[in-house]
Amino acid sequence: MEQTAANLTDTHQRVIRYLRISVTDRCNLRCRYCMPPEGVPDLRHEDILRYEELLRCARVAVGLGIHKVRITGGEPLVRKGLVSFIGALADMGGIRDLALTTNGLLLRPYAADLKAAGLQRVNISLDTLRRDRYTHITRRDALPAVLDGITAAREAGLEPVKINVVVMRGVNDDEVIDFARLTLADPLIVRFIELMPMGAGEWNGGDDFLPGEEVLARLRSAFTLRKSDDGSDPARADRLYRLAGAAGQIGIIAPLSHHFCRLCNRLRITPDGCLRTCLFSETETDLKPVLRGGGSDEDLAALFRRSVREKPTGHGRIAGAWQKCCTNMSRLGG
Ligand code: SAM
Ligand code: SF4
Ligand code: SF4
């Protein structure tokens, strides 16, 4: 394992390389599993980090060995000035992989500018290919705009485009095969993700939960599936497969039933400036007192190191013994 003085290493010898920055808790959709129809109470404007503050955090993190950064939210594209922020991150140097997670609704107007600013790729969340169902799940009639956003991302060269599908029993699980077929002709990576019990999102006592293994079994009953993971990134969240002759790939992300905590190399910053070392642990370190109280970059780095040292081993959640995470996904960014 690579070890330098600058490394962020936790007590389980996991080296943290990956920072997810949630730039806003606001969103233009209302996905059922993420928030209620009325949305969640907005963070106070003054609590949200300014872009300069986020850039400072990113610079310190890169100095500590972070080389992969993902921008998320809420919906990151609803925050004004995002393209310039991404440009500043790209220009900073040291980030080898700069990506964005989005619901895709605003990609048509922004994709080309994002690419020009230095964004490398996008993950687009899309749980159904049926318009009425999309409206049901997200509470907005936006499927045509999202599909056009996917086209825009590919035209702009934000590739490989990954499509994130949260699979829910009795809601969209009958579309697993249709989604997999998309990878035959197009070089898309379609990733099936397990539903998680998060904050104010709907959970229905776990009735809608469908384990990744079941998705895999359904795929195997319809296609010949080959493992296509090249093993180059052991910390990746998805297990990768390819259908025979397909241009694209299929991923299975099973955070609950097949969690990858042992290899987890990620760290999150919330829009209000809290460091979170595990999606499911409510423990956070507020960076604002140092950021806004005249602290130095070394003070900030010390907070990063201390927080990482306390990174939990994992979530320890077992299928059937669900425990809901109190924090809203729209603040954590997935
Ligand atoms: N708004 C953007 C989007 O939807 O892509 C970025 C933020 S969203 C919180 C990030 C990811 O979290 C999305 O892929 C979304 O589907 C996923 N997500 C939100 N709530 C979830 C839940 N309860 N279970 C599983 N995934 C969830
Ligand atoms: Fe918005 Fe993403 Fe949450 Fe859906 S999952 S409500 S798009 S933040
Ligand atoms: Fe990492 Fe926590 Fe998710 Fe496990 S549950 S993979 S430790 S963020």
Image: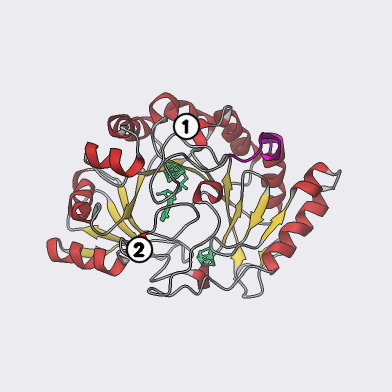
State which quadrant residue 128 falls in: top left
Q: Name the residue that disc number 2 marks.
A: 229
Question: Which class describes the residues within 10 Å of circle 2: few (<14), some (14-19), or many (20+)?
Answer: some
Do the CB atoms of the residues marked 1 and 2 lie less than 8 Å apart?
A: no
Q: Horizontally, is 198 left or right of 54 in the view? A: left
Q: Residue 201: percent from the left, percent from the top?
A: 44, 52
The N terminus sits in image quarter:
bottom right
Question: Would residue 253 be seen by someone viewing this image from the given angle?
Answer: no
Question: Would residue 184 be seen by someone viewing this image from the given angle?
Answer: yes
**Residue 171 lies in the magenta-colored region:** no
State which quadrant residue 43 falls in: top right
Q: Horizontally, is 102 left or right of 47 in the view? A: left
Judging depth in this view, the residue of 173 and 97 nearest the camera is 173
SS category of the residue bearing label 1: helix
Q: Name the residue that disc number 1 marks.
A: 115
Q: Is residue 140 above or below residue 176?
A: above
Q: CA distance from mark 1 to mark 2?
A: 26 Å
- Residue type beneath disc 2: Asp
Residue at (48%, 52%) from the top-left corner? Answer: 200
Residue at (81%, 49%) from the top-left corner? Answer: 290
Count of numbered circles on the image: 2
